[in-house]
Image: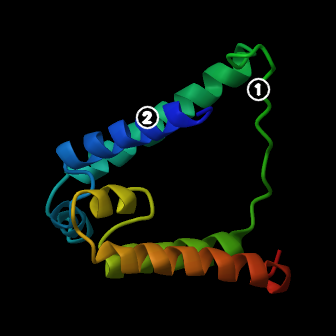
Amino acid sequence: MKYLKFLFLGIFFGIVLIKAQLASWYRFEEMFLFESFYMYGIIGTAVLVGALSYQIITRFDIKALDGTPIHIKKKPFMLKAQMFGGLVFGLGWALGGTCPGPVYAMIGSGYSIYIVTLGAALLGTLAYGYLKKYLPH
């Protein structure tokens, strides 16, 4: 019962993704073929909002709802690992037709074939957790 609000927030977010066509294979295809600015505009807006939010949180020492300070850890830049991860993510997105975020909305809207994409994403996450100690830092 404690996390029920998050379930409803996730359902609402999924409905927004579907209604705004942000979980549409056709929109992804248009984006990858550079035929439409729609998805690039959405992604660019999200990056801009995230950057502005980060600046506001760090500069004005914004606190969480429960009053605790928000600390955002700096992560080291690992060029090889990030390039490899981006390549694998992009290939999975292009081949699967969806990224891990909207895959739940796609399954919820009746596209049951995306269960395979979700399974592959979960398998990749498990493989990364197992192989992380062998990857270059």
Comes first in the chain, label 1 or label 2: 2
Q: Residues within 10 Å of mark 2 (few under 14, many from 20)?
A: few
Q: Is residue 51 above or below residue 134?
A: above
Residue under pointer 2: 9
Res 32 → quadrant: bottom left
**Label 1 to label 2, Cα distance in Å?**
22 Å
Residue 113 at x, y = what percent? 28, 78
Q: Image height check: is 36 above or below 127?
A: above
Task: Tell me residue 120's x, y (percent).
Answer: 48, 81
The residue lying at 44 percent from left, 72 percent from top is 118
Is residue 78 visible to us here? yes
Count of numbered marks: 2
Q: Residue at x 37, y 63 (%)?
A: 103
> Image point 67% across, 83% down: which residue?
127
- Under circle 1, the secondary element is loop
Is residue 80 visible to us here? no
Residue 105 image label: none
> Does 75 sit left or right of 79 as displayed?
right
The foreground one among 37 and 94 is 94
Q: Element under label 2?
A: helix
Q: Is residue 123 left or right of residue 49?
A: right
Residue 70's label in the rendered image is 1
Looking at the rendered image, the quarter that the N terminus falls into is: top right
Q: Residue furthest front?
A: 1
Percent across and percent down for residue 84 are 61, 79
